[in-house]
Image: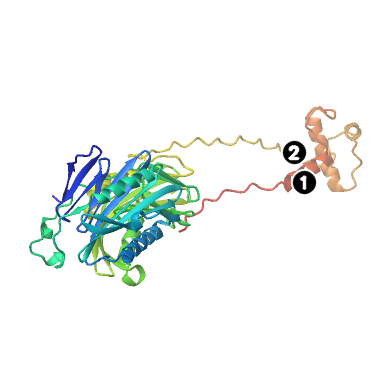
């Protein structure tokens, strides 16, 4: 067992004892052990008033016995931390006793800071405790409404620190008296909940994540990192015009997604990516149709990474793609293989909390087929009855002179000046006779002159454009 929590004589603190790194420290009873490695342990705490992270790290071969060097090491440490976190308005608190104190019978150095991260007010305190040729680094930070109160708790915890180590002149790795690595057992990892909601209006989505995780937004993607352990990462990629295989079936799209992820792994190199990738293994994949215009594609896979410094890592990835019309959101959650069993529920919770916009449709376990609305059939347009052709060359064949005179008088029609006008007028008078010889204003019958104008207006109306179903592009 690497570390245990032991109730102390203080009502609101407990004593943490670590047999592997050989130290003890008092912590608040609402802090919990979030991670432990062979060089450091990490505590976290969350309340409605803020969150806290506290890291205790043993640095072998690093020593700051000199006062000025010790404070300079702290300032460099915090500068690097703030560079990664994009801190703003950093200010150093006045040093108590010049930043020098005694902790565990050793001279120690401590500096506290205030800074802004995103829209949150934060504080941090860094303590360095030199021990012969090595040093202990105690680094804690808190963001939220009560961040300053939490910092006082971190200072009190640092004062309670006690090391069990007798000497570090001989490297611990070669000391046969030291606990061998085969006996190292990590304590249970307590995984936080995804309680914070992040919304990005430019990339049109919202997603939940644990409080205290670092969110960084770029032009077409967002990263959300567990900055305490550094071992869990969420990435959201947005493609406004989708991908090239929009006309594929969902099963074929799923095949293309698997192929793309596999090829990206196999094509990585030290030169282009600073790493190589191998042993790409798909554990599951599924395509889900939400509506006719919305499909989701989920996949879980693992891969082996070798970095350019020779270190290796096995990563597990959960992937969820949302295809809505021409837009695609690719959401991936990555963690180390040895933490996957602890983090899988959290990763799944984060992926399922993802909400693309403008769609508000939530992904369900089974596909939901939409019922297409019936398209109304256009009403039939009656065909105009053909006007019988005259059996004679006379354009007014079958029409009496009285009928011609009466029509011309009622509708103020001048005599035709050409054969074409005479034929057209004859046809118009025949239709007028067929309709019962109505007077002007009694029916929709128009004169041959008005009919020409009406036809011309209709010909000048623009044709309605047809919608185009575009292909996705990446």
Find disc 2 in the rendering and name its residue.
387
Residue 151, image x and y in percent?
34, 47
Residue at far left of view: 177
User: Is residue 280 visible to the viewer in this orientation of the structure?
Assistant: no
* Residue 456, label in figure: 1
- Residue 405 figure quarter: top right
Front position among marks 1 and 2: 1
Residue toward you, 244 or 188:
188
Mark 1 neighbour density, 10 Å: few (under 14) some (14–19) many (20 or more): few
Residue 81, image x and y in percent?
36, 58
Q: Quadrant of the C terminus?
A: bottom left
Residue 416, image x and y in percent?
89, 44
Q: Is residue 382 left or right of residue 377?
A: right
Residue 49, image x and y in percent?
38, 40
User: Is residue 47 visible to the viewer in this orientation of the structure?
Assistant: yes
Count how many numbered circles sit on residues in the image: 2
Q: In the figure, 165 relative to 407: above or below?
A: below
Q: Give the residue at x 64% y 36%.
A: 381
Q: Secondary structure at mark 1?
A: helix
Q: Give the residue at x 78% y 41%.
A: 454
- The first of marks 1 and 2 along the sequence is 2
- Residue 386 figure quarter: top right
């Amino acid at each position: 067992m690497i570390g245990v929590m032991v109730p102390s004589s203080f009502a609101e603190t407990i004593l943490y004892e670590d047999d592997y790194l050989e130290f003890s420290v008092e912590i608040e009873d609402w802090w919990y052990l979030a991670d432990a490695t062979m060089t450091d342990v990490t505590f976290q705490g969350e309340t409605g008033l803020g969150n806290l992270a506290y890291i205790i790290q043993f640095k072998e071969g690093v020593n700051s016995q000199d006062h000025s060097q010790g404070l300079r090491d702290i300032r460099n440490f915090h500068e690097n931390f703030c560079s990664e976190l994009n801190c703003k308005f950093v200010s150093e608190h006045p040093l108590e006793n010049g930043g020098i104190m005694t902790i565990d019978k050793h001279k120690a150095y401590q500096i506290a800071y205030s800074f802004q991260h995103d829209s949150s007010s934060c504080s941090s305190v860094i303590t360095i405790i030199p021990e012969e040729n090595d040093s202990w680094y105690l680094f804690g930070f808190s963001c939220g409404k009560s961040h300053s109160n939490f910092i006082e708790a971190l200072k009190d915890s640092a004062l309670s620190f006690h090391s069990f180590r007798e000497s570090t002149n001989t490297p611990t790795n070669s000391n046969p008296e030291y606990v061998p690595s085969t006996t190292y057992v990590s304590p249970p990892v307590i995984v936080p909940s995804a309680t914070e909601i992040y919304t990005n209006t430019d990339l049109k989505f919202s997603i939940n994540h644990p409080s205290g995780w670092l969110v960084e937004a770029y032009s077409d993607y967002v990263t959300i990192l567990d900055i305490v352990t550094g071992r869990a990462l969420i990435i959201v990629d947005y493609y406004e015009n989708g991908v090239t295989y929009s006309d594929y079936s969902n099963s074929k799209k799923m095949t293309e997604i698997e192929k793309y992820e596999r090829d990206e792994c196999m094509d990585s190199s030290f030169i282009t990516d600073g790493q190589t990738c191998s042993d790409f293994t798909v554990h599951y994949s599924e395509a889900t149709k939400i509506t006719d215009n919305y499909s989701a594609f989920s996949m879980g896979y693992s891969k082996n990474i070798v970095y350019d410094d020779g270190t290796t890592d096995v990563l597990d990835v959960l992937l969820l793609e949302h295809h809505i019309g021409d837009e695609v959101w690719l959401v991936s959650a990555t963690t180390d293989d040895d933490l996957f069993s602890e983090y899988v529920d959290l990763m799944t919770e984060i992926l399922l909390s993802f909400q693309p916009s403008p769609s508000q449709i939530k992904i369900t376990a089974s596909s939901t087929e939409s019922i297409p609305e019936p398209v109304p059939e256009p009403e039939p347009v009656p065909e105009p009855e053909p006007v019988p052709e005259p059996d004679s060359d006379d354009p007014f064949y079958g029409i009496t002179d009285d009928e011609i005179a009466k029509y011309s008088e009622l509708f103020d029609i001048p005599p035709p000046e050409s054969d074409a006008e005479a034929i057209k007028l004859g046809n118009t008078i025949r239709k007028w006779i067929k309709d019962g010889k109505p007077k002007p204003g009694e029916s929709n019958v128009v004169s041959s002159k008005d009919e020409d104008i009406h036809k011309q207006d209709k010909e000048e109306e623009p044709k309605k454009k047809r919608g185009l179903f575009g292909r996705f592009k990446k």
